[in-house]
Image (cartoon, grey):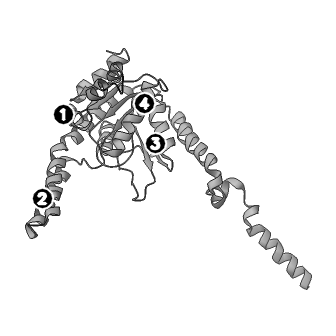
Amino acid sequence: MGDDRRVEENYQRILRSRSYRVAYRDVEFLSDPRLRPTRMELELLKPELVLQENRVVSTVVVFGSTRIADPATAQRNLELARARLADTPDDPRRRREVARAERILAKSRYYELARQFAAMVSQHGQRQQTLEYVIITGGGPGIMEAANRGAFESGAKSIGLNIRLPKEQKPNPYITPELCFQFHYFAMRKFHFLLRAKALVVFPGGFGTLDELFDAMTLRQTQRMQDIPIIIFGREYWERVVDFQFLADEGTIDDSDLDLFRFADTPQEAWEMILRFHGEL
């Protein structure tokens, strides 16, 4: 009897052991640092297969700040900042908060412009069995939300590529559910932004937006990706952020590199640039 009990206990331990788990269901195994290449391949394959199943042929990428809210929200945030300052009018940090909130409110018009642009694009590209010019964003708030919202309100599909961050980024509520993805690796996320892109439209933003813009500019400069229009939306903002002409004058980029991008200030202007580039206008 003792031996039978030991055999049964050992058998149950076998069934519970990590080694007995099917590899693809073993989350602990898949999380091992040595499995990074496999995880990266999965992040490459999953969106690729899903987009194929949904007949997504081409995309228009929209980048921009997570902090540029819609005008109503920006106005409320400014009022809250002013109320906090009224409690402690000599606090320099709260004065700074008011000044920054005023600047965000001034830029909230870009939220509406991104929304209009995405609606315009989406109404054009989704009339066939295959989906062309599908709006794709980082899936978060701000300008990303505005672009997904524009597609949503026009009855079209749009894509969101969320990323796992220390402060969790939640998907905005306007992304097409079956086209909302979550990434761990920035590299794989960037790859999917550009893989099907027929245009890149960059609204005002900060570090993340600059990173995504210059990543695409470098790939275009070195001819490592397809030829697409890169449209920098909001000349007044961007010419203060980056002096592209200075780079050319200093010889650190070629004069011809200034032709890699164009400025636009209206949704219609940006959309016509894209259509003209692809010979559709």
Q: Amino acid at mark 4?
A: Thr
- Element assignment for label 4: helix
The mark nearer the N terminus, 3 or 4, is 3
The mark nearer the N terminus, 4 or 1, is 4
According to the image, label 1 marks what residue?
A: 236
Quadrant assignment, res 5:
bottom right
Residue at the extreme bottom of the image, as rendered: 2
According to the image, label 3 marks what residue?
A: 179
Q: Amino acid at mark 1?
A: Glu
Q: Amino acid at mark 2?
A: Glu
Residue 93: percent from left, percent from top: 17, 62
The mark nearer the N terminus, 2 or 3, is 2
Q: CA distance from mark 3 to mark 4?
A: 28 Å
**Up-down: is 7 above or below 24?**
below
Would you say the residues marked 2 and 4 are in contact, meaning their CB atoms lie under 8 Å apart?
A: no
Q: Residue 79 shows which numbered tag? A: 2
Measuring 18% from the left and 34% from the top, which residue is drawn there? Answer: 236
The mark nearer the N terminus, 1 or 3, is 3
> Is residue 56 visible to the viewer in this orientation of the structure?
no
Measuring 15% from the left and 44% from the top, which residue is drawn there? Answer: 106
